[in-house]
Image: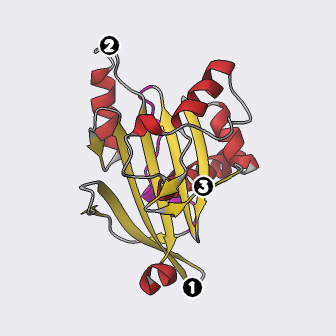
């Protein structure tokens, strides 16, 4: 049963982080304000360099601590994870250092957590950034969840499976990776007001 909670927590983390990443910067410009609570010195150094975001869509970001469940998941994740707050939205950023099946789609994570996710669709914002988005509901509340994966070269993916096979193949090329998986979770009531 604990593995199920860990999976759901990791999925939620994956789904929420991208909301706070500043999309007008290349992924290499992110560096962590604080390192994850677990991992090697090298991992913490990568986190410091890769996950420090200060703004997302012109809104200031406030880094949030990982939950206990997220921290346990992060201990075995091949990369680093950070959570941010931008107003009432949540942004989860995961730096992934190698191809992994531990990177799950936000849609799967929300469904596993008991949410009723709607159909996904690809959306391109004004910055020509592609996102895979869906609405999710639970207990009368609704959220818009958008996610994407990108690398420092400007490549972007809207689904985990496409990224995985591309990343697996590109590992044969020196300098492939890291990749940044970003998940943005916004309450729909707030989205409708703005």
Secondary element type, mark 1: loop
Q: Which residue is mark 2?
A: 174
Residues rendered magenta in the picture? 98-114
Front residue (pair 91, 142): 91
- Residue located 47% across and 53% down the image: 18
- The reply to whether dot 1 and dot 3 touch (C-beta < 8 Å) is no
Queried whether the magenta region covers residue 86, the answer comes back as no
- The reply to whether dot 3 and dot 2 touch (C-beta < 8 Å) is no
* 41 to 89, vertically: above or below: above
N-terminal of the two: label 3 or label 2? Answer: 3
Residue 172: give its label: none
Front residue (pair 151, 53): 53
What's the CA distance linking mark 1 and mark 2?
48 Å
Residue 99 horizontal/vertical position (percent): 41, 28
Q: Nearer the viewer, mark 1 or mark 3?
A: 3
Note whether residue 169 is visible.
yes
Q: Which residue is mark 1?
A: 140
Front residue (pair 72, 31): 31
């Amino acid at each position: 049963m604990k593995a199920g909670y860990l999976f759901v927590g990791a999925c939620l983390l994956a789904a929420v982080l991208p909301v706070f990443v500043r999309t007008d910067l290349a992924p290499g410009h992110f560096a962590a304000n604080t390192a994850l609570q677990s991992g090697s010195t090298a991992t913490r150094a990568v986190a410091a360099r890769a996950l420090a975001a200060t703004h997302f869509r012109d809104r200031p970001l406030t880094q949030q601590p990982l939950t206990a469940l997220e921290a346990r998941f992060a201990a075995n994740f091949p990369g680093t994870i950070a959570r941010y707050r931008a107003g009432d939205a949540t942004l989860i950023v995961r730096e992934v250092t190698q191809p992994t099946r531990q990177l799950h789609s936000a849609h799967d994570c929300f469904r596993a957590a008991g949410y009723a996710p709607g159909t996904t669709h690809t959306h391109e914002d004004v910055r020509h950034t592609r996102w895979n988005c869906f609405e999710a509901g639970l207990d009368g509340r609704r959220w818009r969840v958008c996610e994407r994966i990108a690398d420092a070269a400007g490549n972007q993916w809207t689904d985990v499976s496409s990224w995985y096979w591309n990343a697996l193949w590109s590992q044969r090329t020196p300098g492939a990776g890291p990749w940044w998986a970003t998940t943005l979770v916004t309450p729909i009531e707030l989205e409708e007001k703005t």
